[in-house]
Amino acid sequence: MQATPADPSIPDAFLTPVEHLFVRNHLGPPPELDAASWTLTVEGLVERPLWLDLSALRGLERTSLTAFHECFGSPARPDVPTRAVANLEWSGVALAEVLALATPRPQARHIWFEGADRGSFAGESGLTYLKDLPLDRAREEVLLADTVNGEPLPARHGFPLRAVAPRMFATNSVKWLTRVVLADHRPEHLFTTRLYTRAPAGGGAPRPVREVDVNSRLLAPHHGGAVPAGTSQVTGRAWSFEPVVAVEVAVDDDGWRPALLQPRGPQPVWQRFTLPCRLTPGPHRIRCRATDARGRVQPPSGARNAVHTVEVLAV
Ligand SMILES: Nc1nc2c(c(=O)[nH]1)N[C@H]1C(S)=C(S)[C@@H](COP(=O)(O)O)O[C@H]1N2
Ligand SMILES: [Mo]
């Protein structure tokens, strides 16, 4: 996978500037799509198959969405934390608007999203980037976005149109979207049934990587940095499928203390937390741990959403 790392110094801003946003492409460089000839097809179990060009799409009612955007990380290493996360404002057309035009048949249960990129991954060639979601879920939440943070989508982030599946790992947010298929079954494909699946904690059949875990990331102080000894403001961001209801911070082996946490509000945005901490001169280990409205807590270690730790030197 071509991946630029998340900027190690994510700016402490509510919206992540697009130039700080990570890029994840499985099938090579971004396809160069021509806005004038691009179309989105909607086919399969629908009463009216559609071929929409950009002007037809832009004639539909517009809406916007601000949401966190989290990469799952390598599908081969599902337990390794990456904390590649951003918070972005998207605008475009609700998937539901397009589905209302196409009218899914009653047998349609699943929706497939395919991008225009073509290439090889994990030894398989001739691949497209294909993902699927349960239709009901996608109809409620998915946005077909043509802008990010108020600007047209850059080529690397999916120009001219991408799906945005809020509260799900960003692997589901298909870039360079050109085809939507309504079906009564899930597609058998490298990126749907063979990769991007994981075994549930309690055992059982692997499930597709969709709903994000409860997670948090310290932004300040920076890992490996030096801070003045004394009181230091510890800051970070927390996010989950459900709203985060608590974040705790621990310095060294002192106990967990509750941080001040911004509420999530109606949109699935990341939540800022802060806690003033006293740091005596010398090295320190600072940790943060989020709990969400479902009662899920970040595990101490061994998981992709394990407690985040930074090491700093107070001088
Ligand atoms: N068409 C297409 N869509 C894609 C991908 C891809 O390789 N091709 N990568 C996915 C993954 S794994 C992630 S994390 C997000 C990253 O979106 P970004 O590059 O805009 O940050 O796009 C998703 N959508
Ligand atoms: Mo990803």
Image (tube, rainbow, N blue to C red):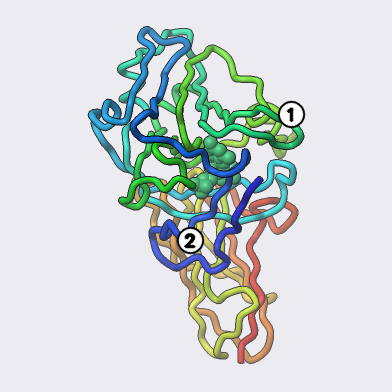
Residue 16 in which image quadrant:
bottom left
Picture disc at residue 20 = 2
Give left or right: position of 260 versus 188. Answer: left
Query: Could you tell me the amino acid type at mark 1?
Result: Gly
Residue 82: numbered disc: none
Earlier along the polypeptide chain: callout 2 or callout 1? 2
At x 72% / y 35%, what residue is drawn? 199
> Where residue 278 sits in the image (x, y, percent)?
55, 84
As displayed, is residue 147 above or below residue 191?
A: below
For label 1, count other residues whose C-alpha is less than 10 Å away and answer few (under 14), some (14-19) or many (20+).
few
Residue pictured at 71% horizontal, 52% vertical: 80
Q: CA distance from mark 2 to mark 1?
A: 38 Å
- In the rendered image, which residue does mark 1 sit on? 204
> Which residue is at 52% across, 14% downward?
183
- Give amino acid for label 2: His
Q: Nearer the viewer, residue 168 or 248?
A: 168
Q: Nearer the viewer, residue 241 or 93?
A: 93
Vertical comparison of 194 with 246: above or below: above
- Crowding at mark 2 (Cα within 10 Å: few <14, some 14-19, many 20+): some
Q: Secondary structure at mark 1?
A: loop
Work out which quarter of the rendered image holds the N terminus and state it: top right
**Closer-to-camera residue (52/107):** 52
